[in-house]
């Protein structure tokens, strides 16, 4: 699954280029691989929120931290209603997220398989993020019609243990392998602004870029520091670091959807535009992104109109 085309030194050289050079190169590569001036619009639905046994330091859904979130599980009818509404918002892909350590066989998993079939019948692409997955479960998801599975590597292997103690970096890689071997597309990315060094971001991109085949989708999140989590006092990551990360991901993962994911809320429209110029071509729509605030859809559509971007459907 791994090849070593991209070295740390090469990615480091790209990451530190002057911003105009970076944006120019990243935008050129984007245009060679996707229709120009387009953006993929995704809808994330949290089907089970909170009470997660894992200890990811950035996450308000961990049962170990005292955070103010609306915990609960959505019914099938509620999920389908949100998915149907999403079509009106030009959404091409629905992502179902559950705060689980891993998928367990049984009633809950079976109901997700059923929901996937129903959402597929609406002619939407479907992604799931349900935690760790074995190869049998990955096959069942594929058979149900799932297109893509999200499992982030979060950060570099070197910094990983500072952030998560309850599952290893290797376990994440194993889940990604199971996903790929089942014939599903892979969505995997990470989070910046967790106190990591530039070298960690470079290393994270190196691992993603050297996957063979490369992930079809790479979300780049900027930490939303949430009260009650161990990372609550982290400062907002600089826009230039976000732009550098996105552009470097675009240059090294040319055919991948690079998603400007969590962390958009509270950024100016100009800052978000810089990220789109730097090669991001995918966003989440909706006022809520799991437990954190997201841009209002109307604001997004106004921005796309102002700068001339069109929704991309495949
Ligand atoms: S990131 Fe996922 S696995 Fe980690 S605590 Fe949050 S919901 Fe659980």
Image (cartoon, rainbow, N blue to C red):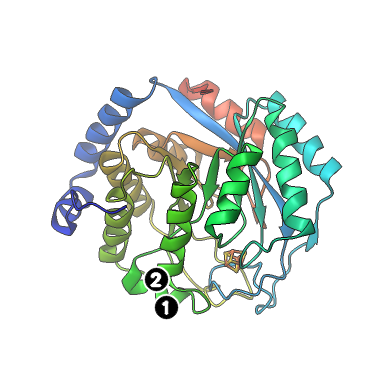
Relative horizontal placement of residue 160, taking residue 201 as reference (left or right): right
Q: Where is 102 relative to 269, above or below?
A: below
| Viewer-side residue, 299 vs 45 | 45
The number of numbered discs placed on residues in the rendered structure image is: 2
Residue 140 coordinates in the image, percent (x, y)? 62, 47
State the residue position of label 2: 195
Relative horizontal placement of residue 271, taking residue 240 as reference (left or right): right
Question: Residue extending furthest front?
Answer: 136
Residue 162 coordinates in the image, percent (x, y)? 42, 78
The structure residue drawn at horizontal position 32% and vertical position 52%, both measured from the top left corner, is 1
Q: Earlier in the sequence, mark 1 or mark 2?
A: 1
The structure residue drawn at horizontal position 75% and vertical position 41%, both measured from the top left corner, is 115
Residue 77 coordinates in the image, percent (x, y)? 85, 41
Quarter where residue 204 is shown: bottom left
Quarter where residue 284 is shown: top right
Looking at mark 1, is its residue's CB closer than 8 Å to ligand 1?
A: no
Q: Where is 84 relative to 275, above or below?
A: above
Which quarter of the rendered image does ligand 1 occupy?
A: bottom right
The structure residue drawn at horizontal position 32% and vertical position 26%, both measured from the top left corner, is 33
Q: What number is the disc on residue 58? A: none
Mark 1 secondary-structure assignment: helix
State the residue position of label 1: 162
Q: Where is 165 relative to 14, above or below?
A: below
């Amino acid at each position: 699954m791994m090849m070593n085309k991209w070295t740390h030194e090469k990615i480091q050289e790209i990451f530190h280029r002057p911003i105009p050079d970076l944006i120019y190169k990243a935008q050129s590569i984007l245009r060679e691989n996707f229709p120009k001036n387009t953006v993929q619009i995704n809808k994330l639905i949290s089907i089970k929120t909170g009470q997660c046994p894992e200890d990811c330091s950035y996450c308000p859904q961990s049962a170990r931290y005292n955070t103010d979130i609306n915990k609960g599980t959505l019914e099938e009818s509620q999920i389908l209603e949100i998915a149907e509404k999403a079509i009106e918002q030009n959404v091409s892909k629905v992502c179902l997220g559950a705060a689980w350590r891993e998928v367990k066989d049984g009633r809950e998993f079976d109901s997700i398989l059923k929901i996937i079939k129903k959402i597929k019948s609406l002619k939407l692409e479907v992604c799931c993020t349900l935690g760790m997955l074995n190869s049998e479960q990955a096959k069942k998801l594929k058979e149900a019609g799932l297109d893509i599975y999200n499992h982030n590597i979060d950060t570099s292997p070197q910094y990983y243990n500072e952030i998560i103690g309850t599952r290893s970096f290797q376990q994440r890689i194993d889940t990604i392998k199971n996903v790929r071997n089942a014939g599903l597309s892979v969505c995997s990315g990470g989070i910046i602004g967790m106190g990591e060094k530039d070298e960690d971001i470079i290393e994270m991109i190196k691992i993603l870029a050297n996957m063979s085949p490369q992930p079809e989708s790479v979300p780049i999140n900027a930490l939303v520091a949430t009260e009650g989590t161990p990372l609550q006092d982290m400062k907002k990551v600089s826009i230039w670091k976000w732009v550098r990360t996105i552009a470097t991901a675009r240059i090294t993962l040319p055919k991948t959807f690079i998603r400007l994911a969590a962390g958009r809320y509270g950024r100016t429209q100009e800052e978000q535009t810089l990220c789109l110029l730097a090669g991001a071509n995918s966003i989440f729509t909706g006022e809520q992104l799991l437990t954190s605030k997201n841009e209002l859809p109307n604001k997004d559509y106004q921005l796309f109109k102002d700068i001339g971007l069109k929704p991309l459907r495949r």
